[in-house]
Amino acid sequence: MYSTTVTRAATALLLTANTMVSALDLDITSVESIKNTAATIAYDMMLEYKGNVSGGYIGVLPGPPPNPPTGYYWWESGAMWGSLIDYWHYTNDTSYNDVTSAGIQAQVGEDIDMMPSNWSQSMGNDDQAFWGMTAMLAAEYNFPAPADPKAPSWLSLAQAVFNTQAVRPDKECGGGLRWQVFPYLTGYDYKNSIANGCFFNIGARLARYTNNDTYAQHAETTWNWITNVGLMDAEYNVYDGAHIGHNCTDINKVQFSYNSAVWLLGAANMYNYTNGSAIWEERTNRLLNRTLQVFFPEPQRVAYEVACESTLKCTTDMFSFKSYLTRWLASTIKMAPYTHDTIMSYLKPSAVAAAQQCIGGANGRTCGLSWNSGKWDGTFGVGQQMAAMSSVFVTLADLVPVAAPFTNATGGTSQGNPNAGSGSHHDTSLIKPATGSDRAGAGVVTALILIGATGMFGWMSI
């Protein structure tokens, strides 16, 4: 992932001029209200997706920046499909299932490992892994399999991502994944928490799903590395990353919510996989407590992106981080049920606050980043919509049955392939241009259904 400052002031002013003050009316004690609110936000989010119209890239949001300047990087498209799988799982609304399935399958790549050559010039380990985590989620939830019997299964896609990444850690800084996959990419000399956290997350979840301890061993090794190198400190703060040239001693101590959350969900899965072992219980507890302290300040207990929210000097990517924070906290409850009361006491006020500030734009319901302000902050985009939507639908867990992720022993139906990704061959000297087959055909139109700084962050991992 690459950072890009979002500058939309002129457009925001135009939207503000036409704003209707009509905050989404969310009642978190009402199933109907939660579903309607989440559906409205989801619909507005999907208006940004152009992959279902002539000339659009199937599975991919417009972008990357600066083409257009308000565009998105490839990884966020994979993250968005993951949010819609969660949306379906919590709400039982199937409206976006077909476009989600098609979007994921369109980006599996030539080697069926979530590394399409079209995106080689911005391929980070975290980028690939976000698509892998989405595939893992589809497997865990028994998301409908693709209609094409030749299409790769959800589980095999997650395994392919894991297998291709398992061979990439090197001896620099004592181990760990580099941020970028290819040597020609800026950031190849950077090892960071999100790339390694995603790998840890997938490994822990594969261990639980398949009951194969090899995945758990990789997860344990990755945890040991991040704590030994200091990217997760003794107080369970999770920092961004460090450079190989400094033997990873120049730790960038900026904290992002998705860094903490991706490690938390992985730890909770390890707790579940090990039948509640004391060590993984302690790790889960301490990481949970620190995540809540840093990103849900008292007394509001409303999700807050500490690195950029106060000034709104956020990159495109940062606007989406609260989506993963809230969703992965909710999933942590399923893996470690004893965390329920604590986590929900933060998720519920966050949902209310998120909905209350969705009063922007020409439609009077556009969502921003600043949830605790009670007003729209003038920012808008897929990330803001995704985050607000996620915060809302996870509160359904207290009102309706929401199944825990399946395993292959508890009803999981996705068939795996332990050797998936073993045939991957990515020649860094070959970068294939986009072809017409990657675009939606002229006659393909899928109807969406309405349900009702840089200066601060530079080029580092975002």
Image: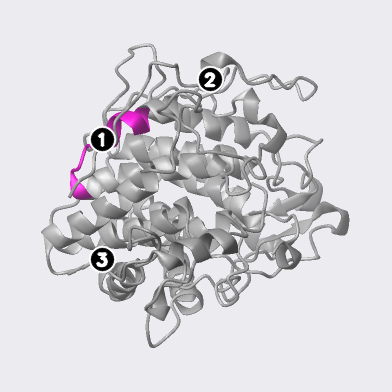
Query: What residue is shown at x 72% (from left), y 56% (from top)?
Result: 460
Q: Bin the neighbour count of mark 1 within 10 Å (Cα to Cα): few under 14, some 14-19, many 20 and up.
A: few
Mark 2 residue type: Asp
* Residue 379 visible in rendering: no
Q: Secondary structure at mark 1?
A: loop
Q: Secondary structure at mark 2?
A: helix
* N-terminal label among 3 and 2: 3
Residue 97 is covered by the magenta coloring: yes
Label 1 or label 2, whichever lies nearer to me, is 2
Where residue 453 appears, as percent x and y from the top left, is: 69, 64
Between tags 3 and 2, which lies in front? 3
Kind of residue indicated by mark 1:
Ala
Q: Where does residue 333 sit, x and y in percent of width and height?
A: 30, 61
The residue at 66%/69% (across/down) is: 254
Q: CA distance from mark 3 to mark 1?
A: 41 Å
Q: Extreme top residue here? A: 150
Residue highlighted by disc 1: 409
* Disc 1 to disc 2, C-alpha distance: 37 Å
What is the crowding at mark 2: few (fewer than 14 residues within 10 Å), some, or many (at least 20)? some
**355 w.r.t. 181: above or below:** below
Q: Residue at x 64, y 58 (%)?
A: 226
Q: Which residue is mark 3?
A: 24
- Residue 118: say if magenta: no
Q: Which numbered marker is on residue 438?
A: 2
Q: Is residue 230 visible?
A: yes
- Quadrant for the C terminus in the image: bottom right
Magenta range: 91-101
